[in-house]
Amino acid sequence: MQFRNVLAVAALAGSTLAANTSNNSTLTTATPAVTKACSFSDFTATASDEVAQVAACATAVGDITIYGPAFGNVELTGVEQIYGSLDIINATQAVVLNAPTLQLVSGTLNLDGNTILATLNLAQLTTVGTLVLNALPALEKTGLTAGITSAENITVSDTALISLEGINVYELAIFNVNNNKDIETIDSGLQSVTNLISISYNAEKVDVSLDKLTTANQVYFQSINSLSAANLTSVNDSLTLTSNSIDKIEFKKLTSIGKSLTINKNDNLEELDFPALTKLGGALVISDNSQLSNFDGFPNLTTIAGTVTLDGKFNNGTFDSLNRVSGGFNLTSTGELSCSAFDKANKFTVEGNELCSGAKDSTSSSGTKIASDSSSETGSSSSSSATSTHTSSSKKNDGSSNAASRLTALIASFMAVGVAFY
């Protein structure tokens, strides 16, 4: 199993999240009064009769943990609301979790390390603070019949889910789906994600549909087959697409990215389409996409506030509206696109250092263009050589003149001596 993304996600999840969320993601925080029997303080159940104490309460208050190998089924029929967290962890003999009446968990609902759990019945669950489904290698369906409509964070990791259904939240802080080896579709009605969207290290055939998503913060896509985000208009942080089998990356309505855009190691990628993107607040990296022959998909991009790195087998490429690059500009093309051809087609200002390496020519400079002309380089070298030769010749001529003057003076002296003797 691969968990390459877990540390980064944990760090982000540990950061402070927004206290108030809009639409239907605002959770009920007021804790109701309950009887002593239904007030649980760090309660851990290791046997079925202890789980029954929780199930006997329509409303339970406190953090509840169900743990250990004593359960064949975890039976929670009867409990409707838990004001606190519910952790079901390492129940290694549990095959079924039955909680058909559960509607709300105000804290975290965490199912982790239940290695043969195959059936979830969460038919009425609509509200949860954080949902974590982790290390559930036998689980093929979420069991979220009504669908979650209110949550702050959702993480689904290392399951046998074939599709991710029942996630109908409008706004989340974190949406993280990783290491689900059998998942084929991820279709979510999410409209906004305020911290992180990460879909990574799942089955390479997974198709992702986020067509209701309009705004996001940090976005990371890896190992996906297709992507649709037809209404995404802004990414406040960075957008990364790496190691996907996708053949076209298309964001029709995306107008701005607050930080960097990285597109690399997508072996089947043939086309980029960012027709509305006007501003990039950080670096642009397009590299190691073996089938991508051009980077013409940014017709209205005017400013890039970081360094540009373009590396691939490019046959052509232009930035029709680009005015300024605040960082450096590095272009490496092993295709037909030469540095001189790129320079003729693009007239933008680069404030940092520039490097261009084409199949036919290369140069590095610190000017405002990616000019690369082999003949001008040769001419410059020849001119320098000529200047050097000219300087050397002048020194030799000066030496000869001095020697002649000394010889003339010497002859004049001998003549004067001769006249004197005469």
Image (tube, rainbow, N blue to C red):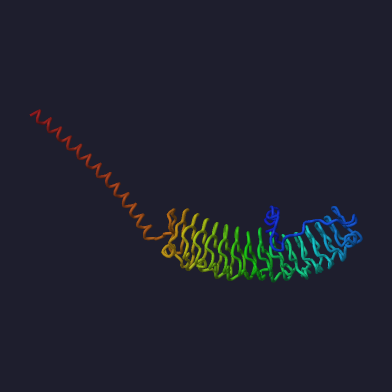
- Residue 390 or residue 73, whichever sits in front: 73
- Residue 148 or residue 305, whichever sits in front: 148
Residue 89 shows in the view: no
- Count the marks: how many? 0
For the point 77% across and 59% down, which residue is it?
28
For the point 84% across and 64% down, which residue is it?
80
For the point 64% across and 64% down, which residue is it?
222
Most distant residue in the top direction: 421
Q: Is residue 75 left or right of residue 14?
A: right
Image x and y of residue 392, in percent = 30, 46
- Quarter of the image containing the C terminus? top left
- Quarter of the image containing the N terminus? bottom right
Q: Is residue 415 left or right of residue 337?
A: left
Image x and y of residue 242, in percent = 61, 63
Image x and y of residue 188, in percent = 69, 68
Residue 53 shows in the view: yes
Most distant residue in the right direction: 49
For the point 19% across and 38% down, which residue is it?
405
Q: Is residue 411 above or below residue 184?
A: above
- Residue 290 or residue 399, whichever sits in front: 290
Residue 52 location, quadrant: bottom right
Image x and y of residue 350, in percent = 46, 56
Residue 61 location, quadrant: bottom right
